[in-house]
Image: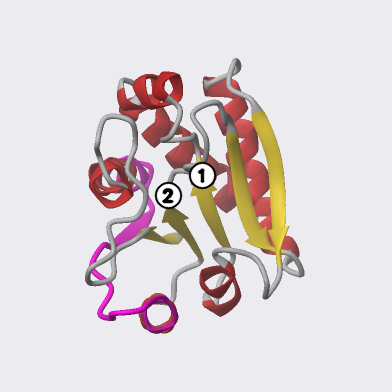
Amino acid sequence: MSRFALCVGHSRRGDRGAVNTKGVSEHVFNLPLAERVCELLEDAGHSCKIYSSYDADNYESAMRWVSKEVGAWRADAAVELHFNSASASAEGYEYLFWGSSQRSEKLAQCFALTHKQVFPKSKFRGLKPCDNLSRGAAFLRRTPCPAVLLEPFFGSNAQETDLYSASLEQLARVYADALCLWASNKS
């Protein structure tokens, strides 16, 4: 049994994150998704905890708070749920990890593999190693266990927003299956 921290991105006070083409913020989109992933993980015999209200007002404080909470809970791995936003034509999925963490890279690989299996027509933008200058770096750097930022689609792309909004169960299974795959191979 593994312990997984599901962190809902943009959970600090006053932060909604990006908004998709349907007008739904990252936080509102990802909270029920995290709840379903947690159900699937618990059904598979794992423990999970959702962090969806970071006790902070700015990014750095939020990352310090969530990493402390995840560490205190002794999570085996942590993810932060997001979606990308750029131009209307931007597309695809990517998974970000701390560049010097081989265990985080292996976790990111599990997400890429399960995503490709469930959404074979979606464009894979790659695994993205991060450093101190990268977006999302504080979550990846500070979290005391393997950690990945999940970016499954572009909310600025209407087709992708429609596809993933209609496929929440499949996306939840991608995430749960990736975590279970990593847990089965982590030793």
Question: Horizontal and vertical percent for residue 154?
Answer: 48, 35
Question: Horizontal and vertical percent for residue 34?
Answer: 31, 48
**Mark 2 nearby-residue class (10 Å; few <14, some 14–19, many ≥20):** many
Residue at image position (23%, 43%) is: 32
Q: Is residue 125 magenta?
A: no
SS at badge 1: strand
The quadrant of the image that shows the N terminus is bottom left
Residue 138 picture quarter: bottom right
Q: Is residue 37 visible?
A: yes
Q: Is residue 185 visible?
A: no
Query: How many callouts does the rendering have?
Result: 2
Q: Can you tell which mark lies on residue 25? A: none
Residue 98 picture quarter: bottom right
- Reply above or below: 16 against 73: above
**Mark 1 nearby-residue class (10 Å; few <14, some 14–19, many ≥20):** some
- Reply above or below: 141 against 182: below
Q: Are marks 2 and 1 in contact (CB under 8 Å)?
A: yes
- Reply above or below: 16 against 124: below
Q: Can you tell which mark lies on residue 82? A: 2
Residue at image position (58%, 63%) is: 135
In magenta, the rendered stretch is 40-62
Q: Amino acid at mark 1?
A: Glu
The quadrant of the image that shows the C terminus is bottom right
157 and 49: which is toward the camera: 157
Q: How far, Cα to Cα, is label 2 from label 1?
A: 5 Å
88 sits left or right of 73 in the view: right
Q: Is residue 50 magenta?
A: yes
Question: Horizontal and vertical percent for residue 64?
Answer: 43, 84
- Reply above or below: 125 against 146: above
Q: Amino acid at mark 2?
A: His
Q: To which residue does mark 1 refer?
A: 151
Residue at image position (64%, 59%) is: 97
